[in-house]
Image (cartoon, rainbow, N blue to C red):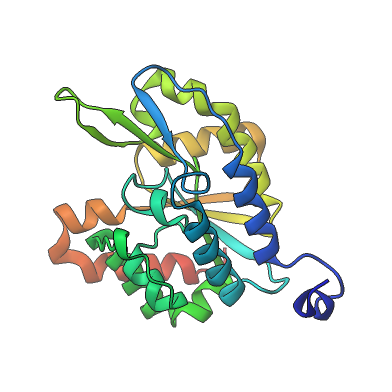
Amino acid sequence: MNRRNMLCGGKETFSEKVLKFNEKLAHKEVKLPEGFRVVNPYSGNQKELVREVATAFYQKYYNDLRSRRLILGSSPARRGSAITGIPFADAQHLQRETGILMDKFCINRPAGDFLYDVISKYGGCERFYADFFMSFVCPLGIAKANAKGKEVNCNYYENKNLQEALYSFMVSSMRSQIDLGVDRSVCYCIGSGENYKFLSEVNERYQFFNTIVPLEHPRFIMQYNSKNKEFFITKYINALSSNL
């Protein structure tokens, strides 16, 4: 038993539970329809580096017994979280957080910058991660081949057969993430369209959360409403700060 676990009375810390959840994902096999493939950072070519970064990150911010509110996106971006293994965190941000260089994957996207602006406005990383755990409805990335044969990012809701193939995995993953130590009074949904629609339908059936709060996706904000960025940051902060 490590020292931190001893200080927590022998109970598993939030970080230990997350890292165990990631390890289960590393061995998870999901059969998808033809033309789609799973992008699994926990079992890919960089799995040892991903494990090192994830361990450093979660032990830094989640090594306690606190309950967190859950923030769920749709699925990891093929060239973002599906590489780093940390939801909504790209390589450059993670290097600043952990001191570990992921030199082959220094992808810094406007959507990630928006969320870091939200985190900063909320009070910084320590306060934000003490209150929230960020993840996905589908915690593994999905890629597909487009009409030109190029592999591109894909969301679980873009194809009916794909969604059906992933349904039981996504429900099981939500159960597992709730078991990490999540406050079930509210879940924040990143993506106020199809992701919110699906998550609401699942929640109506399984009663995972009392309330689901939809928030516009950072990619949508930065691509189509960048001039209103401060408005959306304030909207995020108001929602996250609300005692529902």
Say if 136 sits above or below 121 in the image.
above
User: Is 232 positioned to the left or the right of 120 in the image?
Assistant: left
Of 57 and 204, nearer the camera is 57
| Residue 112 occupies quadrant | bottom left
Which x, y percent locates residue 28? 59, 36
Compared to residue 214, the image places residue 9 above or below, namely below
Rendering quarter of residue 66: bottom right
Q: Is residue 52 visible?
A: yes
Left or right of residue 232, residue 170 in this image: right
Please tell me which residue is depicted at 42% across the width and 43% down the height of the picture: 74
The answer, for residue 210, to whether it is visible in the render is no
Q: Residue at x 44, y 82 (%)?
A: 123
Residue 121 placed where, x, y %? 37, 79
Q: Residue at x 14, y 25 (%)?
A: 148
**110 or 3: nearer the viewer:** 3
The structure residue drawn at horizontal position 32% and vertical position 73%, both measured from the top left corner, is: 117
Indicate the position of residue 170 as horizontal and vertical percent values.
56, 35
- Image coordinates for residue 147, horizontal then vertical, percent: 16, 22
Q: How many marks?
A: 0
Q: Quadrant of the N terminus?
A: bottom right
Of the 4 image quadrants, the one containing the C terminus is bottom right
The quadrant holding residue 38 is: top left
Q: Is residue 114 left or right of residue 27?
A: left
